[in-house]
């Protein structure tokens, strides 16, 4: 028996759900320190270019494939390619979802633990002591019981929302969480800017320092454009498959990109104004959030509340992304295997949680990837963001170029567009060029990464940059 397919309740609901998927740890945790360390506004300009040139066409592609087929990735590629091997791009997406959620759920657990840690006033004892804070964080993530406990709670939230379905679960959750994230971030920005010396943080984040920009930061900006827009694994195909033909995919895609970028900028502003006002180290990199921030929140007025709010938005952002990852897997089993939503969610949410347990343990004593010389956690992170997502994205672009055809893609995109301001054949050429450029650029980057991995020598170094 075929399940009748759910649809989004409203256009706003869809945009909030899709931008909820996009806005996640990538925006609040990764972007600020990447931008801060790689040339400030210079990095941001490159990142925005990557989003427009590579991100936008692939985002439009995924949404159009989903809406056209009303199916999740495997079925969608199967249907549009008349049952050819392109379905493997869909399977790659399901596999990426599995890999990403395994470690994403672990970090999701940390955000929950730190929200309660801040709420209980625990940051007070860390005030002004980055070494102590670092020791506490490393001990926490490396211990066997605590992080797993929080990871399982985070995964239960995630499964709870997915079980409730597209409209009341995913959309309902995004309609509450996304506005809350925006409001609280706005308050944090306001607080940061009102602190003496906070404005120096703006300079750090936004003043262009082109001398700090190097080829590897450009590669980083491109990879991040994929991760932050949740592209390359069929998330947006799945979300697009719950859309009807009335929706204008162009404006929806622009909204998703604008919200995602805006929230990344707000997060960067909130973090660096507070860091600079308190004279903390802005170049702490990935440890900035879990190590440095807990030492400075107690120093600002009402620090326990601001700290709690900060980690709470990090938790909500992680959750709205995690559900979109689990939905890719659940939708596959509903669409292709005819399973019930409950069965698919509980079984695969459960299996991913178990893999996540090994991820978490790998940061302590028990690393099942020890042979590879990195933790299982880092292995899954690198595998997905450096290889699986970009490969999935480039293959999606190639699929449109070589199989589905740009013309049919454009016809699908134009459904729901009331008034077209550009000439249709011009638009066709622009899309074609953008898709070719995206697949080429991504292809080059993957070759570069593989080269680096295999021979410890990247092409850019060989070329003498
Ligand atoms: N976009 C999310 C973030 O920025 C991560 C994500 C990647 C979500 C891929 C879904 C799919 O954190």
Image: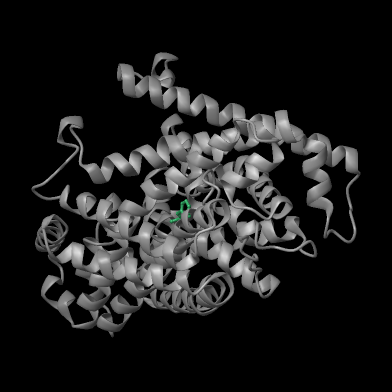
Nearest to the observer: residue 406 or residue 141:
406
- Please give the name of the residue rendered at 49% of the width and 75% of the height, measured from the top-left corner: 164
Nearest to the observer: residue 375 or residue 246:
246
Numbered marks: total: 0
Q: Is residue 156 left or right of residue 78?
A: left
- Please give the name of the residue rendered at 74% of the width and 63% of the height, measured from the top-left corner: 244
Looking at the image, residue 357 lies above or below residue 411: below
Q: In this view, does 215 lie to the left or right of 405?
A: left
Looking at the image, residue 297 lies above or below residue 41: below
- Please give the name of the residue rendered at 63% of the width and 73% of the height, measured from the top-left corner: 13
Looking at the image, residue 417 lies above or below residue 307: above
In the current view of this chain or complex, which residue is farthest to the front?
A: 1
- Whole-percent x, y for residue 348 in the image: 38, 57
Residue 384 appears in the picture as rendered:
yes
- Whole-percent x, y for residue 90 in the image: 55, 42
Nearest to the observer: residue 67 or residue 347:
347
- Whole-percent x, y for residue 242 in the image: 65, 62
In the rendered image, the quadrant that contains the C terminus is top left
Residue 51 appears in the picture as rendered:
no
Colour scheme employed for the rendering of this structure: one colour
Q: In this view, does 270 lie to the left or right of 339?
A: left
- Please give the name of the residue rendered at 45% of the width and 37% of the height, measured from the top-left corner: 388
In the rendered image, the quadrant that contains the N terminus is bottom right
- Whole-percent x, y for residue 302 in the image: 28, 85
């Amino acid at each position: 028996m075929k399940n009748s397919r759910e649809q989004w309740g409203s256009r706003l609901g869809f945009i909030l759900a899709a931008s909820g998927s996009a806005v996640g740890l990538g925006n609040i945790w990764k972007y600020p320190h990447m931008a801060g360390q790689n040339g400030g506004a210079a990095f941001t300009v490159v990142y925005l270019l990557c989003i427009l040139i590579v991100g936008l066409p692939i985002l439009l592609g995924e949404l159009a494939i989903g809406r056209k087929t009303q199916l999740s990735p495997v079925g969608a590629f199967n249907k549009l390619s008349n049952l050819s091997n392109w379905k493997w791009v869909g399977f790659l997406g399901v596999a990426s979802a599995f890999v990403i959620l395994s470690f994403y759920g672990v970090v999701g657990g940390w955000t929950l633990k730190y929200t309660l840690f801040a709420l209980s006033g625990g940051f007070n004892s860390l005030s002004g002591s980055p070494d102590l804070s670092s020791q506490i964080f490393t001990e926490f993530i490396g211990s066997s019981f605590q992080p797993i406990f929080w990871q399982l709670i985070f995964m239960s939230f995630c499964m709870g929302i997915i079980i409730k379905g597209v409209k009341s679960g995913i959309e309902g959750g995004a309609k509450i969480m996304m506005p809350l994230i925006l409001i609280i971030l706005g308050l944090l920005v306001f607080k940061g800017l009102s602190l003496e010396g906070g404005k120096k943080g703006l300079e750090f984040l936004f003043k262009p320092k082109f001398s700090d920009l190097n080829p590897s930061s450009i590669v980083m900006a491109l990879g991040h454009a994929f991760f932050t827009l949740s592209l390359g694994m069929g998330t947006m195909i799945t979300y697009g498959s719950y859309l009807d033909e009335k929706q204008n995919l162009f404006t929806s895609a622009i909204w998703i990109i604008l919200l995602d970028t805006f929230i990344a900028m707000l997060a960067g502003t909130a973090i660096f104004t507070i860091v600079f006002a308190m004279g903390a180290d802005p170049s702490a990199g990935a440890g900035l959030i879990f190590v440095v921030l807990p030492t400075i929140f107690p120093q600002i007025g009402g620090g326990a509340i601001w700290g709690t709010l900060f980690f709470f938005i990090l938790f909500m952002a992680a959750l709205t992304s995690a559900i979109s990852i689990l939905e890719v897997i659940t939708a596959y089993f509903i669409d292709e295997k005819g399973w019930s939503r409950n069965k698919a969610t509980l079984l695969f949410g459960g299996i991913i949680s178990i893999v996540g347990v090994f991820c978490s343990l790998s940061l302590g004593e028990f690393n099942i990837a020890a042979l590879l010389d990195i933790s299982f956690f880092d292995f899954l992170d690198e595998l997905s963001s450096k290889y699986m997502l970009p490969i999935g994205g480039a293959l999606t672009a190639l699929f449109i170029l070589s199989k589905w055809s740009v013309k049919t893609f454009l016809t699908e995109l134009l459904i729901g567009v009331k008034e077209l301001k550009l000439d249709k054949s011009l638009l066709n050429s622009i899309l074609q060029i953008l898709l070719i450029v995206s697949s080429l650029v991504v292809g080059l980057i993957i070759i570069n990464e593989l080269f680096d991995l295999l021979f410890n020598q990247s092409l850019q170094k060989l070329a003498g940059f």
